[in-house]
Image (cartoon, rainbow, N blue to C red):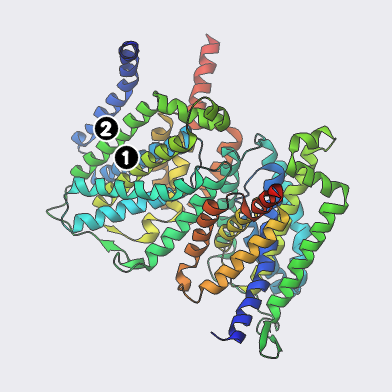
Amino acid sequence: MNTVDFLNLLISAILLAGVYAAMSVGMTIIYGVMKIVNLAHAGFLMLGAYFVFELYERLHVDPLLGAVLAFPVFYFVGIAVYWSMVRRIPRSDQPTLPSLLLLFGLWLVLQNLGYMIWGNADRAILTPRTFSTLQVGQLIFPTVRLVVFGVAVASLVALDFVMHRTWRGRAVRALMQNSDAGRIVGVNVDKTARIAFGVGIAFAGTAGGLLAMMYSFTPDFGGSFLLRSFVIIVLGGLESFSGVAIGALILALVESFSILVIPSGYQPAVSFSLLVVALVVLPNGVAGLWNKRQRLT
Amino acid sequence: MSEAATDKGNLFPLLAKAAPLLLAVIAVAFIPAAHPSPNIIRLMFVTLVWVTTSVAWNLIGGFAGQVSFGFAVFYGLGAYTTAITYSTGVDRFDSILLGACAAMLASLLVGLPTFRLKGPYFAIATIGVSEAVRVIMTNLGFTGGASGYRIMERGPFNQLLHYYIALALAATAIALSMLVRYSKFGLALLAIREDEEAASDLGVNPFRTKLLAHALAAALTGAAGGVFVGYAAFIYPQGVFGFDISVAILLMPIIGGLGTVWGPPIGAAVYGFVHEELIASFPQFHLLLFGSLLILIILFEPAGVMGLAYKVVGLFRRRK
């Protein structure tokens, strides 16, 4: 492999990492605030993809705009799910059996509603952008991936701003660190959890729309990305935003470069192996490593 | 000395607890004597296999509170191991035992890295492992890959033989579940479910206890897969490793009542018969119904059929 090929692969990995981070950050917010593993994440990724697809097919809305529009729509979907189901199960500072099973059930329902509505045919969003590339010297940048990367990174920057500069964002971070202490200083746990759940689902919807521009999809679309999101947030230490970025980069790099040695049929096994390695070597994620280093010095 | 004395003291209540099992086994064993149609026997056979997997899932999911979404891995590995070893000339009983062993080994793959850690890692890893194993089995050459594997049958097919093997396995599973529930080991599992840190402070080793329960559950599920393949004679990855198998295995004990001895078999019986009807009328959407059922049970009756039964009994007692 020569240098140009290597650099092209590296570029595609980094561009992929952007959308991976946007895809996983929603899970991190929900886990951090409520200690709930959002297994229905896969269902909302899939719905996001079909949302953008339908807008494009029926109303000719640009998929990029569609993905941005998905954010507020899925925010309210998330609020509705929280209000009707999630708030009814007992709260805990550990992931509980009811929460896992409830969201798993929701995933099954969403996925099979998808099959009911759209059937199992492969769909794809094809725009003039899909096959165009931007060439700089010998380096090739696929336009879609660049644009998707741009939106993903912009959404993450906006999230970072909200988390650090607004009262509500600080409340979310406070609950992530210590929910009892957060309650004592006057954070409304129920309201903050509701907003966090909404934002988490909103990110899933937008990320689903972004992924739909890059890949073809079926109602089973979210499953493999759910596993990838797990790997990313475990690598990132479950509740750290910078950890998500690093985890996404690691997974994207491993996936992109493992294609050279491992047949593409075995790709899900690659993410799983990375998950096991992460659990054995870095149980607290990359962020845990960082904290340990800081504590030692 | 004192321990032996308490053991003797517990003997009678234990017998009283085992009586329903004995009665159920005798009743089910005499069903073929009424000469029902082969289709009924087939349905009973499948239900008995489900009883085994359901009781197995409950050992780790119900007693210890560790949700697994990947029991199809054990079921499928058991089925494939049994099929391959039986075809190469191993005795039927031994091949099922080998299937159980293969599943037990696979349980360590998930258990060893995740049971040391607190948090949702086990549940997450079980979703990953079922995806990974299905992909590998679909691409693997010597098992026939995606197109499946056919057993070399020796001698004529005897439906009742398979029926009684399944019954024996299901009875063994329920008896094991009883032994676990009323032993120190079972109490350790319940303690872990309620509060892992407190259990650990009281001298329970959570890692070893969970690992053992998981291995036991995997072995039973693998044996169930082996029993099933003896009857089906043909398997393919999507059929035994499929996601819907994992979902079915976890749904049954939840329908019946998590963490009880009799909930999972009841759940399996309900599922076995209802599923047959559903598949016939809605072949596409049974997972949609499963999902809705899961949501409804968790929100409104987390204790399942057993919980409902206790509520009804309680209502009658209050009337008196």
Task: Give the left or right position of residue A85, taking residue B320 as reference.
Answer: right
* Residue B174 can be seen, yes or no: yes
The kind of residue tagged 2 is Val
The kind of residue tagged 1 is Leu
Residue A234's spot in the image, x, y percent?
Answer: 60, 53
Q: Relative to the observer, which residue lies in front, A200 or A217?
A: A200
**Label 2, on which residue?**
B28
Residue at the farthest top position: B320
The residue mark sitting in front, 1 or 2, is 1
Residue A148's spot in the image, x, y percent?
Answer: 71, 72
Rendered residue at 30%/52% (across/down): B79
Task: Give the left or right position of residue A173, taking residue A100 as reference.
Answer: right
Q: Relative to the observer, which residue lies in front, B89 or A164?
A: A164
Q: Locate residue A25: give its quadrant.
A: bottom right
Residue B254's spot in the image, x, y percent?
Answer: 49, 37
**Label 1, on which residue?**
B48
